[in-house]
Image (cartoon, rainbow, N blue to C red):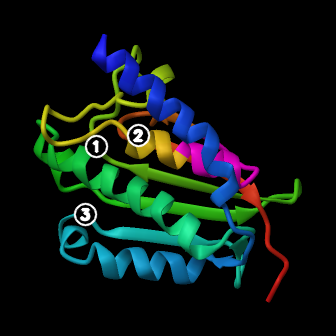
Amino acid sequence: EALHRIQDLVQRLLRLAPARMETGHCDLQQVFADVRMFLSKRLDSHPLLVQLEQPNLAVSAAPGDFFPVLLNLVQNACDAMDGAEDVESRKGEIHVHAVAGDDGLVHIRVEDQGPGVDAELLPHLFEPFVTTKDVGHGTGLGLALAYATVRQLNGTMEARNGDERGFVIELKLPISEAV
């Protein structure tokens, strides 16, 4: 019963968050450089390979709002590969691909080479307190907050398992035209 009350409280907090979002210009090249710097030790084991299809690609978001989203996604990819049972997954890379779509959105794909997620869990990954991590190693709030942030930024976020292995998060966010 207590867990249900906490879950309800967190869901209400997530609904209140839009008032805190700032408009802005978030240069993807810079934000990925910041993620690399912040996670430099972890990325020694799991190289972060970023492919931006256009120079100066940016989303309409304050860097302080969008950085935690990307940081969480890259950390989760590292965690998934660190916890993998097979050696090949534990030495995997993180691939990021970003392109400006014809729809006025930046399409960002973050893909790891880890074990993926159980199919039964996929529809619930963005719910508070849902985690694939062992007890004491995750709160189950990271993806829920990232999802809420992306929605507040007028974007979308979807998750799926990779074709052969791994896990994929796809974001779509409004392009920033500011310079």
How packed mark 2 is, by other alpha carbons closer than 10 Å (few <14, some 14-19, many 20 or more), is many
Left or right for 161, reference 24: left
Q: Amino acid at mark 3?
A: His
Q: Nearer the viewer, residue 80 or 178?
A: 178
* Secondary structure at numbered mark 3: loop
* Secondary structure at numbered mark 1: loop
Q: Nearer the viewer, residue 71 or 57?
A: 71
Q: Are marks 1 and 2 in contact (CB under 8 Å)?
A: yes
- Residue appearing at x 15%, y 33% in the figure: 134
Magenta residues? Answer: 147-157
The mark that comes first in sequence, 3 or 2, is 3
- Residue appearing at x 87%, y 59% in the figure: 104
Left or right for 105, reference 55: right
**Could you tell me residue 103's position as x and y percent?**
88, 53
Q: Which mark is residue 46?
A: 3
**Could you tell me residue 174's position as x and y percent?**
79, 60
**Could you tell me residue 16's position as x and y percent?**
62, 43
Q: CA distance from mark 1 to mark 2?
A: 7 Å
Q: Amino acid at mark 2?
A: Phe
How packed mark 3 is, by other alpha carbons closer than 10 Å (few <14, some 14-19, many 20 or more), is many
The relative height of residue 103 versus residue 163 in the rendered view (above or below) is below
Tell me the residue that label 2 is attached to: 167
The relative height of residue 33 versus residue 137 in the rendered view (above or below) is below
Q: In this orientation, does residue 152 appear?
A: yes
Q: Are marks 1 and 3 in contact (CB under 8 Å)?
A: no
Total of numbered circles in the picture?
3
The relative height of residue 1 versus residue 57 in the rendered view (above or below) is above
